[in-house]
């Protein structure tokens, strides 16, 4: 009987996630068939200990390793398949929903650790988003990414197409009454499910929709480039401040694990001080009628659309701000795609301490998206740096006579989900976003200097900015 009580106590402790597998098996080693313990555990967990099962427990027996727990399960047709009792191995299950369940470990430290078990918030507690514009980015990336979000959910749509609204709302479980036309945009104010508006429209519409959106009292996440000019950015920041709502620019790279890993290695001076960055973001484009090829709608060509990644990511990696730029711009004469916007921009930025960043962006080459940070004692090279996935990080340094080139792999995350969840976290915890409107404004100031330099054929100085991360808010908690 004494041993039966010990069993009960231990199983009860098991139910409160304190017993180790060693203890669990040592009980089995003293004759407790795993199935019996599981039955007892199940009754303990339901709060009705089964005294009979406990009493029936043998007090002596064979060691665990020799206990044959395999039995058979007979299917309806009489076929027998192997069976053993289903049990719950020891796990820590914190009551706090933001803390992950810790499962029993089974891998050694020889291999990389797997990421923590996700901690999604219950759907009714997540921040509700209204997506404005149902184009490529919204349909191909953002709406699917909500499936990987922990703190964000889509609850409303704004579009000029009733057909798209109907179909997409049905696909993502959005209520028909939460679908709005552009004319009805302001009605978002009266939708209590919406806490955030995500602007995913052509660049020239960002300013208007951020300013109108701020008046609804909802927080605003705005796609990059933030606007068509620094002046528009200032107006957007002012409007959000006046309305008391948060404004974040969707710089997904700053929430993407590989780029964050490089940033940490650069700032920790893993290979000494960074000296030089080479960055390229190029792709090909088609369809002269698309808004991206219209200056009034896009604000520019390759530079604000994709070159911006080289610019913003270099600032993010270094944490400092450029003091001078020098640029070349080119558009092939006669190519209808580049009648209004530039085909290519190549520019250099001078950062403090003599760090040079050399960038190129092109709308008329096969895609190429990488950067290399050259430091005193090694380099870090990130391929597919600005892509939605497929980042490949290589480093090179010397040890004695050996030159070591390593490929670093880390767990990946959907960068759109990470970015949206960061904004949700800011709303839920009343924090400033890591990439606020001021971060977007600074990029526009620099892009305006780049265009000026390309037009005038001379270097253009920028206002010096002191300190690190001058335009960024607090670090995201989970990126
Ligand atoms: P898109 O052309 O595929 O979609 C734009 C949407 O805006 C369409 O649904 C269209 O109907 C609507 N729209 C409203 N008024 C319009 C007008 N006057 N002309 C054209 N379309 C109009 O564009 P997209 O690729 O989804 O880009 C949208 C925004 O997202 C842009 O600011 C772009 O820079 C940004 N973007 C960001 C990323 C990223 O990785 N963060 C990737 C792609 C695009």
Image (tube, grey):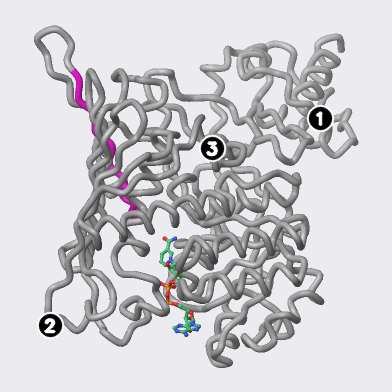
Left or right: where does residue 308 sit relative to residue 113? Answer: left
Residue 343 drawn at (x, y percent) = 21, 69
Question: At 54% across and 90% down in the image, what residue appears?
Answer: 161
Q: Quadrant of the N terminus?
A: top right
Instruction: Tell me the CA gap for discs 3 and 1.
Output: 66 Å
Q: Which residue is mark 2?
A: 334
- In front: 264, or 114? 264
Q: Nearer the viewer, mark 3 or mark 1?
A: 3
Residues tagged 3 and 1 counted as in contact (Cβ below 8 A):
no
> Of marks 2 and 1, which one's residue comes earlier in the chain?
1
- In front: 252, or 25? 252
Q: Which residues are magenta?
A: 385-397
> Of marks 2 and 3, which one's residue comes earlier in the chain?
2
Question: At 56% across and 21% down in the image, what residue appears?
Answer: 67
Left or right: where does residue 158 sit relative to residue 350? Answer: right
Looking at the picture, does residue 331 appear above or below residue 245? below
Q: Secondary structure at mark 2?
A: loop
The image quadrant of residue 131 is bottom right
Instruction: Tell me the CA gap for discs 2 and 1.
Output: 87 Å
Question: At 81% across and 13% down in the image, what residue appears?
Answer: 6
Q: Which residue is mark 3?
A: 470
Instruction: Tell me the CA gap for discs 2 and 3.
Output: 42 Å
Task: Using the image, tell me which numbered label, if any, was put on residue 53.
Answer: 1
Ligand 1 quarter of the rendering = bottom left
Looking at the picture, does residue 253 appear above or below residue 364? above
Question: At 77% across and 31% down in the image, what residue appears?
Answer: 41
Q: Does the stretch in magenta take in 303?
A: no
Q: Secondary structure at mark 1?
A: helix
């Amino acid at each position: 009987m004494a041993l039966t009580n010990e069993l009960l106590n231990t199983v009860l402790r098991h139910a409160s996630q304190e017993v180790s597998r060693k203890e669990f098996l040592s009980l089995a080693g003293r004759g407790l068939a795993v199935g019996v313990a599981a039955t007892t555990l199940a009754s303990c967990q339901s709060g009705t200990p089964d005294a009979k099962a406990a009493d029936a427990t043998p007090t002596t027996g064979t060691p665990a390793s020799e206990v044959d727990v395999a039995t058979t399960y007979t299917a309806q047709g009489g076929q027998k398949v192997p069976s053993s009792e289903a049990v719950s191995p020891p796990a820590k299950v914190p009551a706090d929903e933001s803390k992950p369940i810790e499962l029993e470990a089974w891998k050694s430290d020889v291999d990389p650790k797997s990421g923590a078990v996700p901690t999604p918030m219950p759907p009714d507690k997540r921040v509700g988003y209204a997506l404005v514009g149902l184009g490529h980015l919204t349909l191909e990336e953002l709406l699917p990414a909500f499936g990987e979000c922990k703190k964000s959910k889509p609850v409303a749509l704004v579009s000029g197409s009733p057909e798209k609204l109907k179909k997409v709302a049905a696909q993502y479980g959005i209520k028909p009454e939460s679908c709005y036309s552009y004319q009805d945009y302001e009605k978002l104010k009266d939708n209590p499910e919406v806490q955030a508006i995500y602007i995913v429209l052509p660049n020239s519409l960002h300013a208007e929709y951020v300013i109108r959106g701020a008046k609804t009292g909802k927080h605003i996440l705005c796609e990059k480039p933030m606007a068509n000019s620094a002046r528009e950015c200032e107006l957007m920041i002012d409007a959000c401040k006046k309305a008391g709502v948060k404004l974040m620019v969707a710089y997904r790279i700053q929430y993407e694990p590989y780029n964050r890993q490089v940033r940490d290695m650069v700032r920790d001076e893993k290979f000494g001080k960074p000296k030089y960055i080479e960055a390229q973001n190029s792709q090909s484009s088609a369809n002269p009628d698309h808004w991206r090829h219209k200056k009034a709608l896009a604000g520019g060509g390759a530079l604000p659309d994709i070159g911006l990644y080289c610019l913003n990511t270099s600032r993010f990696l270094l944490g400092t701000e450029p003091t001078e730029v020098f640029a070349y711009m080119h558009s092939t004469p006669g190519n209808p795609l580049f009648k209004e916007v530039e085909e290519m921009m190549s520019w250099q930025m001078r950062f403090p301490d003599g760090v040079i960043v050399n960038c190129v962006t092109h709308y008329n080459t096969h895609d190429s998206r990488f950067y290399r940070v050259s430091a005193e004692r090694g380099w870090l090279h990130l391929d597919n740096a600005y892509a939605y996935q497929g980042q490949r990080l290589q480093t090179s340094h010397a040890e004695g006579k050996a030159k070591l080139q390593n490929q670093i792999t880390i767990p990946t995350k959907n960068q759109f989900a990470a970015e949206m969840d960061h904004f949700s976290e800011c709303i839920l915890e009343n924090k400033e976003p890591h990439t606020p409107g001021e971060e977007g404004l600074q990029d526009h100031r620099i892009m305006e200097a780049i265009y000026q330099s390309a037009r005038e054929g001379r270097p253009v100085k920028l206002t010096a900015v002191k300190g690190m991360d001058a335009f960024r808010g607090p670090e995201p908690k989970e990126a």
